[in-house]
Image (tube, rainbow, N blue to C red):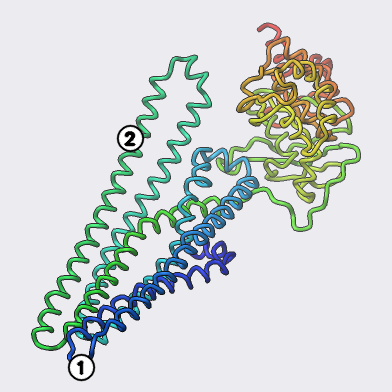
Amino acid sequence: MLRRFMPYLLRYKGILMFDLFCAALTTVCDMVLPLIMSYLTTAATDSAVVLTIEMVLRLALLYLLLRLIDAAANYYMANTGHVMGVYIETDMRRDAFAHLQRLGHTYYSNNKVGQIMGRITNDLFDVTEFAHHCPEEFFIALIKIVVSFVILCQANVLLTLILFACVPLMMAVSIQLNRKQKEAFRKQRYQIGELNAQIEDSLLGERVVKAFTAEALENEKFEEGNQAFQRIKKKTYQYMALFQTSTRLFDGLMYLVVILAGGLFLVYGRIDAGDLVAYMLYVSTLIATIRRIVEFAEQFQRGITGIERFCEIMDAEIEITDAPDAQELSVTEGRIQLEHVSFEYPDDHNKVLRNVNLSIRPGEKLALVGPSGGGKTTLCNLIPRFYDVTDGQIYIDGQDIRQVTLKSLREAIGIVQQDVFLFSGSVADNIAYGRPGAAREEIEHAAELAGADSFIKELKNGYDTYIGERGVKLSGGQKQRLSIARVFLKNPRILILDEATSALDNESELLVGESLEQLAAGRTTLTIAHRLTTVKHADRILVLGREGIEEEGSHEELLKQEGIYYRLWNGMRLS
């Protein structure tokens, strides 16, 4: 984890090095006080040395100067050092979000959004403190332990060795408890992600909850997750308490060694009073340093857990990438060719398409129908490379889509789906998503082409009306027409309509259908439909089933065959 973290830390090595320099200054200031006290004690008790007011004033002035240096250094550490942590957290969050943008549909199918959000927000909060304090605390501890050991050895080597013999035992206990703490923090982070996902589901589905009067059920589900989080957090604090208690016990053990062994050495003249005072002060500094490191261990484990969960995102494999020599896609006609295409989903190896061969003419309106699970949506998802084919090739105007850049490929394809997703923002913002930076006139023209201009102007603030999260303030037909306007603005050569009207009422379906007809004019169009009435005027209709393309032809031709399409059509009419 630390090796993965180091590149982020080293981006700010200038700040880091000066922060460690300031840490060294504060450490020097702390370490000088016992020497001053030892000197004063020795001068006061040793008849060979005369303690004067001038000497006291000089030592006081020296200490005052050191405290001013300490204050300035500490200000830099507390301010700029923490800001460095913020920079690192920001960099890591940026990289995590960019990586998430490149991950495929499979990743999002297998991971909850609440868990993902927790990883790029809450988990990285602790990285700020970790990035600043980790090098700083260990650097200060190293200096203090080494300097204390050297100075204490000068006072009494045997006493120092006895004292430092306690440290390995203390470290062994601390490491063991640290491991348990880390596992508890990991479970805690996972459970808060589960809780976030559960809250998100409940709040986004609040209309369904109210419709089914399921508030009690949701409260019960939330309480179950909340109680699980409580149990995990209680266990975490139990390990923290054991950790801190063991530290205090070892503190007492080290003081006991100094009192017992130091007192005996003083009785037998193996150490003088001044050195014992300095010795006790340095032992206090040493114990405070060890306690600080031990207490930092909680923060350290939180930071490591955050980095670990960040790395889990960054290690998620990007399934769809540009080829090393990928070229820009050039769409001149909009011809699509599928040759021996087979596909199975990578996570469950469910084979959906088998050896499909299909040629779609430029400007042709092709409809895909058939039973659920026949591969209609899957086939359309393969064209913009939301998934890669398992076998075979797909060509657009003679160019293999795996040999062109994803950006140019997806820019050439417009998609209108049944489940419209609108972003929180204004009407204009959502239409402009089709082409960021478009002028207001272009946005309004796209809305006019989509038949959305009239209802937009009736909204309170027109194109600047806030539509709520996921467009909650609009009707289904209005949301669908905004999504069509978005594609009009994008102006692609290839169009995919994935059951774009199946969830609408009859009036909305008629309005949206007219907009879709205008959108499809002159474009190569693939339409997925369950309502066969919406595709009866298509140039060609494909019936997809478990064996691939099972029937093909116009509406009239397929009815004459009296096959699957004929049964679907008559079944729909009877219903």
Q: Residues within 10 Å of mark 2 (few under 14, many from 20)?
A: few
* Residue 37: quadrant of the picture: bottom left
User: Looking at the image, which residue is at 34% across and 79% down?
Assistant: 146
Badge 2 amino acid: Gln
Q: In what element is the residue under mark 2?
A: helix
According to the picture, the residue beneath numbered tag 1 turns out to be: 48
Q: Is residue 549 visible?
A: no
In the displayed structure, would residue 420 be above or below residue 400? above
Query: Picture coordinates of residue 448 (x, y %)?
Result: 83, 21
Residue 277 location in percent, x, y?
20, 78
Given residues 3 and 464, the one toward you in this image is 464
* Image-based side of 381 in relation to 261, left or right: right
Checking the image for residue 271, the label placed there is none
* Residue 244 pos. (x, y %): 26, 57
**Dot 1: few (<14), some (14–19), or many (≥20) neighbours within 10 Å?**
few
Left or right of 81? Residue 361 is right
Closer to viewer: mark 1 or mark 2: 1
Q: Are marks 1 and 2 in contact (CB under 8 Å)?
A: no
Residue position for label 2:
227
For marks 1 and 2, give the CA distance.
71 Å
Helix, strand or loop for disc 1: loop
Q: Is residue 432 above or below residue 369?
A: below
Q: How far across and down, in percent of the image, does residue 293 sit?
A: 34, 64
* Residue 38 located left or right of residue 500: left
Is 228 positioned to the left or the right of 307 in the image? left
The residue depicted at 79 percent of the width and 54 percent of the height is 326
Mark 1: which amino acid? Ala
Disc with the residue nearer the chain's start (1 vs 2):
1
